[in-house]
Image (tube, coloured by chain):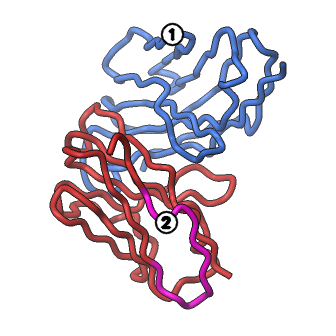
């Protein structure tokens, strides 16, 4: 596709359920990032993938959060036993090169997660 | 850790006028990258302009320009000839040239909501 694609666009679930969010990066982009944006806030960095390895997981808020990536393609962010504080927009971004290059990150439209 | 501060939660400007959005940051690093992103209601973050810290010349992209003051750690965005389509949240972001410990991601400010009045 032409841009970063995220699914679902919106997700409503009950507290305690597990959720899985998907990100399809731009074809050929080796670097992939997940961010969380709470209402009225800026983006918080969660995790970075270079290829299918995650050299930087420092932003994951708890062990309920995990992510994986298949090759230089799709990534999934999984939140187990969701809590109301997990309600936010989860944004994915990709870039052509490694994280510390000057290449900008290209963002998807995000998944709005609402925990009831 | 780096921090980015946007002190203006909301700004309003008349169409065709010029507006400046402020951003300051705190870092002990000498080399880094700075970005301005725009987020319309569609939620997608769109790159507006970027600046490499080692470059003294201020970046410009058509109606958008920055005033980068490295010593003051200031990175303001000027929008000239404001248009209705410029209405959005604007986020200032910092990225280290180093890796690990959260440095791989962008550090964002809390954003400025820009309103364009017709």
The blue-tinted chain is: B
Q: Position of residue A71 (x, y in %)?
A: 15, 61
The part of the chain drawn in magenta is: A6-19
Residue position for label 2: A8
Q: Quadrant of the C terminus of chain A?
A: bottom right
Magenta segment includes A15: yes
Secondary structure of residue under mark 2: loop
Q: Is residue A73 left or right of residue A115?
A: left
Q: Are marks 2 and 1 in contact (CB under 8 Å)?
A: no
Q: The residue marked by circle 1 belongs to what chain?
A: B
Q: Which chain is red?
A: A
Dot 1 corresponds to which residue? B62
Q: Are marks 2 and 1 on the same chain?
A: no
Identify whether B34 is placed above or below B77. Answer: below
Residue at (46%, 21%) from the top-left corner?
Answer: B71
Residue A98, disc: none
């Amino acid at each position: 596709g032409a841009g970063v694609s995220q699914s679902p666009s919106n997700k409503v679930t009950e507290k305690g359920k597990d959720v899985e969010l998907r990100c399809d990066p731009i074809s050929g982009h080796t670097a992939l990032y997940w961010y969380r944006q709470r209402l009225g806030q800026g983006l918080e960095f969660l995790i970075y993938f270079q290829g299918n390895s995650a050299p930087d997981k420092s932003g994951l808020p708890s062990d309920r959060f995990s992510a994986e990536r298949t090759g230089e393609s799709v990534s999934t962010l999984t939140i187990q036993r969701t809590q109301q504080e997990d309600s936010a927009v989860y944004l994915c971004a990709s870039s052509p090169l490694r994280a510390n290059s000057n290449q900008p990150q290209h963002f998807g439209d995000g998944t709005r997660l609402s925990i009831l | 850790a780096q921090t980015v501060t946007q002190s203006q939660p909301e700004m309003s400007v008349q169409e065709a006028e010029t507006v400046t959005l402020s951003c300051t940051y705190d870092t002990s690093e000498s080399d880094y990258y700075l970005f301005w992103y725009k987020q319309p209601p569609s939620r997608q973050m769109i790159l507006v302009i970027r600046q490499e810290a080692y470059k003294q010349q201020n970046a410009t992209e058509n109606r958008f320009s920055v005033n980068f003051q490295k010593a003051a750690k200031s990175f303001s965005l000027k929008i000239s000839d404001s248009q209705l389509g410029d209405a959005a949240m604007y986020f200032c972001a910092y990225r280290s040239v180093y890796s690990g410990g959260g440095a791989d991601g962008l550090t964002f400010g809390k954003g400025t909501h820009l309103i364009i009045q017709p």
